[in-house]
């Protein structure tokens, strides 16, 4: 007597697709029926969610997984609405059917889902050496659930397109967490407000950085509304037409990190049109008191790290103003008041400092090329004067450097003397001093060149424009 074929178990089949949906970041759905058969190529809106109250046997053949939101796969079509349906063939292998989206994103989406499906789902069990002891009687402990490490293979990473880094103040402030440190009363709050107004008005910052207009939140936690109004009036032009800065929102009170601050920033972010910049002035006003036995490094890193994680997730630029130590340091980053946990968590560091040569702004970061600019503040408005190595040089040295830039090659002192109309003995004496100061390189055979060929700012780093 031949037994009837075993019928599929709806609960077991639904469990298989629940697991598949988790792997493919989608949801379990039922394909629409057309002429008595499921149609896996129908319009996305015709697919229905799988019922929560259990699956009927006749619905098993309609099971599939719908995956949406592939906008991270392409920077050119950030909101394409790509949709892919995944069904299982008789042999258990997936079949990916793109339903919507541009052709290039469809292909990228299918490749991504295939990679997610084929990624290993189990953690290999490691057997200790003493488990092999002959004659030993062992008891196997229940298997422990191990959270799977999310990885991506290098070839997939190379083929992935990421949106470009967002510059909020080009060359100075980029998306992520920036720490702006400076001595008391040196003007770091004015510097931060300069940046806020430039971004809110779509204007130029520091006399050289053209900013794309966007919404700005400025937490002036050491000021009051009256003082803040005075500062705004100081920075706004009174004769020429001034920019509209209604996109700049200010507050003089906020919660602390871990006690509502990030939630307050998020509330602002979701209620504005184009959020780009948040300035917190100062760090000491938003950090929590030291917790229990935690070390200062851990406290600093956790506080700054919370802001960095949020800024990176939302692609915002968050600038946190803080103080620096009184003592000098070989590395400018070590001047930040507090432990290295602050600078370790940050994406970029800006240091506003003053010495016998004047005021300067130093910057360095993960996406920020190193710079060291001489700065000048006039009536609250900060302006970049140029690279520190060039500002303050004698007029004669500046002219020699400009002549070297125009030549764009190795030159002799006599050639420089002829071009500048100076006595050759004076040029020879001066270029010798400039080599000793690191302003010129001697390339042999009596010829000289700039230390950084092709770089007009002598920093060795190209800045975004």
Image (spheres, rainbow, N blue to C red):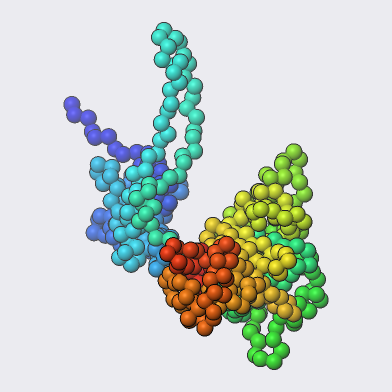
Residue 405 seen in this snapshot:
no
Q: Quadrant of residue 106?
A: bottom left
Q: Quadrant of residue 170?
A: bottom right
- For residue 128, above or below residue 17: above
Residue farthest bottom in this picture: 239
What residue appears at the point 49 percent right and 22 percent down from the top-left corner?
Answer: 141
What residue appears at the point 73 percent right and 57 percent down from the top-left corner?
Answer: 324
Task: From the top left corner, tell me how far across and down residue 21 is, in percent.
Answer: 40, 48
Residue farthest top in this picture: 135
Position of the N terminus, as image quadrant, is top left
Quick check: 183 left or right of 309? right
Quick check: 194 left or right of 315? right
Task: From the top left corner, tell me how far across and down residue 224 is, in percent.
Answer: 80, 71
- For residue 106, above or below residue 232: above
Q: Nearer the viewer, residue 384 or 454?
A: 454
How many numbered tags mark residues here? Answer: 0
What residue appears at the point 37 percent right and 43 percent down from the top-left corner?
Answer: 119
Q: Nearer the viewer, residue 178 or 220?
A: 178
Task: From the top left corner, tell me how far across and down residue 335 is, in percent.
Answer: 70, 55
Residue 26 seen in this snapshot:
yes
Q: Nearer the viewer, residue 327 or 212?
A: 327
- For residue 299, above or below residue 165: above
Residue farthest front in this picture: 425
Task: From the top left corner, tell me how far across and down residue 259 is, in percent.
Answer: 72, 54
What residue appears at the point 29 percent right and 57 percent down from the top-left corner?
Answer: 97
């Amino acid at each position: 007597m031949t037994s009837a074929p075993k019928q599929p178990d709806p609960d077991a089949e639904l469990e298989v697709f629940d697991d598949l949906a988790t792997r493919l970041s989608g949801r379990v759905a039922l394909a629409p029926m057309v002429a008595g058969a499921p149609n896996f190529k129908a319009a996305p809106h015709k697919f229905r969610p799988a019922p929560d109250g259990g699956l009927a046997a006749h619905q098993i053949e309609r099971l599939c997984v719908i995956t949406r939101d592939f906008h991270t796969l392409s920077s050119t079509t950030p909101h394409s609405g790509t949709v892919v349906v995944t069904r299982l063939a008789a042999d258990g292998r997936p079949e990916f059917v793109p339903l919507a989206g541009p052709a290039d994103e469809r292909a990228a989406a299918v490749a991504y889902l295939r990679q997610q499906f084929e990624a290993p789902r189990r953690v290999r069990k490691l057997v200790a050496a003493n488990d092999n002891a002959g004659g030993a009687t062992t008891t196997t402990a229940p298997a422990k659930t191990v959270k799977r490490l999310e990885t991506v293979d290098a070839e997939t990473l190379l083929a992935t397109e990421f949106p470009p880094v967002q510059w909020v103040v080009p060359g100075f402030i980029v998306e992520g967490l920036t720490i702006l440190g400076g001595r008391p009363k040196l003007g770091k709050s004015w510097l931060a407000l300069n940046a806020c107004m430039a971004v809110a008005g779509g204007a130029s910052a520091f006399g050289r950085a053209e900013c794309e207009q966007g919404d700005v939140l400025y937490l002036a936690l050491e000021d009051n509304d009256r003082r803040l109004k005075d500062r705004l009036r100081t920075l706004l032009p009174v004769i020429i037409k001034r920019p509209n800065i209604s996109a700049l929102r200010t507050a003089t009170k906020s919660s602390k990190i871990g006690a509502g601050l990030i939630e307050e920033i998020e509330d602002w972010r979701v209620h504005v049109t184009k959020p780009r910049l948040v300035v917190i002035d100062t760090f000491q006003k938003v950090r929590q008191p030291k917790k229990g036995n935690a070390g200062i490094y851990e406290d600093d890193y956790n506080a700054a790290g919370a802001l960095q994680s949020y800024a990176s997730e939302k692609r915002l630029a968050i600038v946190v103003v803080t103080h620096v130590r009184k003592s000098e340091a070989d590395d400018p980053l070590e001047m930040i008041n507090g432990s290295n946990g602050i600078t370790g968590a940050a994406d970029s560091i800006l240091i506003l400092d003053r010495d016998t040569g004047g005021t300067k702004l130093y910057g360095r970061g993960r996406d920020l090329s190193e710079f060291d600019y001489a700065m000048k503040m006039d009536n609250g408005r900060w302006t970049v004067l140029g690279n520190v190595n060039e500002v303050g040089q004698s007029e004669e040295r500046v002219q020699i450097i400009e002549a070297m830039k125009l030549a764009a090659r190795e030159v002799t002192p006599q050639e420089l003397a002829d071009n500048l109309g100076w006595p050759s003995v004076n040029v020879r004496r001066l270029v010798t001093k400039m080599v000793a100061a690191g302003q010129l390189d001697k390339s042999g055979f009596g010829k000289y060149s700039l230390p950084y060929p092709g770089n007009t700012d002598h920093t060795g780093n190209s800045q975004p424009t």
